[in-house]
Image (spheres, rainbow, N blue to C red):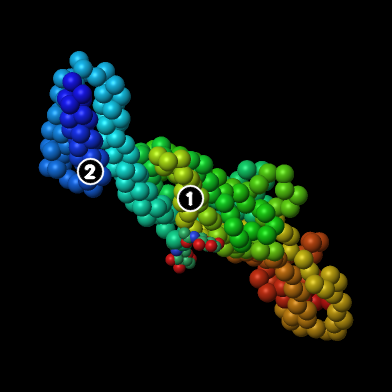
Amino acid sequence: MLNLKQRSLIVRQWLLLLLLIGAIVGPSSTKDDSAPIKQLRRSTTTTAATELRTTPVLTTTTITTEQSPSSTTAPPTARNDSIFLARAKKAFQFTSLHYNASIPENSVGRAFVVPSEKMGIRLSRRQKAAFHDLRFKITSGDKDKFFKAEERYIGDFCFLVIRTRTGNVDVLNRERQDQYLLEVRAQASFQDERKRTHQLEANTSVFVSITDTNDLNPLFYPMEYEATIDEDTPLHKSFLRVTAEDADYGRNGEIYYSLGEKTEQFAVNPISGVITLTRPLR
Ligand SMILES: *[C@@H]1O[C@H](CO)[C@@H](O)[C@H](O)[C@H]1NC(C)=O
Ligand SMILES: *[C@@H]1O[C@H](CO)[C@@H](O)[C@H](O)[C@H]1NC(C)=O
Ligand SMILES: *[C@@H]1O[C@H](CO)[C@@H](O)[C@H](O)[C@H]1NC(C)=O
Ligand SMILES: [Ca+2]
Ligand SMILES: [Ca+2]
């Protein structure tokens, strides 16, 4: 009786040792190597069943040996995570490193910058589900804090939306600054199986040109002119030229001159501002 017990203990220890070796070899080995482990496991259960009649204590060892192979399932998941993460980090990019966009000056409230192409980051369904707190942030180029970057999901695309901030005292003024080069950063976090947080980051720049509105009136400088002409000045002779300026852009800044008071005595060239005599003074 005692002899049998001792022998079974030795067998048990041997099997335990073999199983441990199997557990160590297991995770790094390929599918074909899994067959010997299965065989070993089957042999332990049989010995456990036969010895159960004599020594019930053995059941505890079978539990411990059964537990060790289950710990081998953790590494493949972590490996899966790290492959996913490496791919995701590489894929976490804006569709372009540079975008062009525009917005009219004097835009009030939430006005949106209009890009020439869609701006943002494409995400697979799995990436979209796995990434948390994807945020866009303007990191430089906007010291007056006119703009705000926001994220908008449509299908598999996370759009970068840039809008003006509400509650700003100042408005965009093309005559003061007609372009902004905004540096935008995207950040997201990813938590792996071991609850470790990984940060993902991508950068882009957005060139925002401020388009003009006709918000300025032409101004004469100087504001008053004085001219003395002879009473026998010939007709159509030019004797004065006035100039005004309009700081608006393009058509909004074009100037046409005309006389404020209707008169047949003088005429002003609408383009040049040259004033001529149209009726004899005498
Ligand atoms: C491994 O990744 C695939 C997708 O690439 C996923 O479907 C599968 O569930 C992952 N397996 C584990 C164990 O996480
Ligand atoms: C942005 O605009 C500039 C000048 O207007 C042009 O040279 C450049 O190619 C544009 N870039 C993109 C990405 O559209
Ligand atoms: C993004 O730009 C910042 C500087 O603003 C830099 O520190 C960071 O390394 C950049 N990130 C990537 C992914 O290029
Ligand atoms: Ca104007
Ligand atoms: Ca203007």
Q: Secondary structure at mark 2?
A: helix
Give the image quarter of residue 90.
bottom left
User: Could you say which is closer to the camera, residue 47 or residue 281?
Assistant: 47
Q: Is residue 87 above or below residue 180?
A: above
Mark identifier at residue 199: 1
Q: Is residue 271 visible?
A: yes
**Quick check: 3 left or right of 140?**
left
Q: Is residue 24 above or below residue 139?
A: above
The residue positioned farthest toward the front in the image shown: 2
Identified at 57% across, 49% down, the residue is 149
Q: Is residue 60 above or below residue 145?
A: above
Q: Amino acid at mark 2?
A: Ile
Identified at 57% across, 63% down, the residue is 181
Q: Secondary structure at mark 1?
A: strand
Mark 2, residue position: 21
Where is the C terminus found, in terms of image quarters? Answer: bottom right
Q: Amino acid at mark 1?
A: Gln
Q: CA distance from mark 1 to mark 2?
A: 38 Å
Identified at 66% across, 53% down, the residue is 146
Q: Position of residue 96 (x, y in %)?
A: 42, 58
Q: Which numbered disc, 1 or 2, marks the residue closer to the eye?
A: 2
Q: Position of residue 168 (x, y in %)?
A: 72, 48
Q: Earlier in the sequence, mark 1 or mark 2?
A: 2
Q: Is residue 267 visible?
A: no
**Quick check: 179 left or right of 154?**
right
Where is the N terminus found, in terms of image quarters? Answer: top left
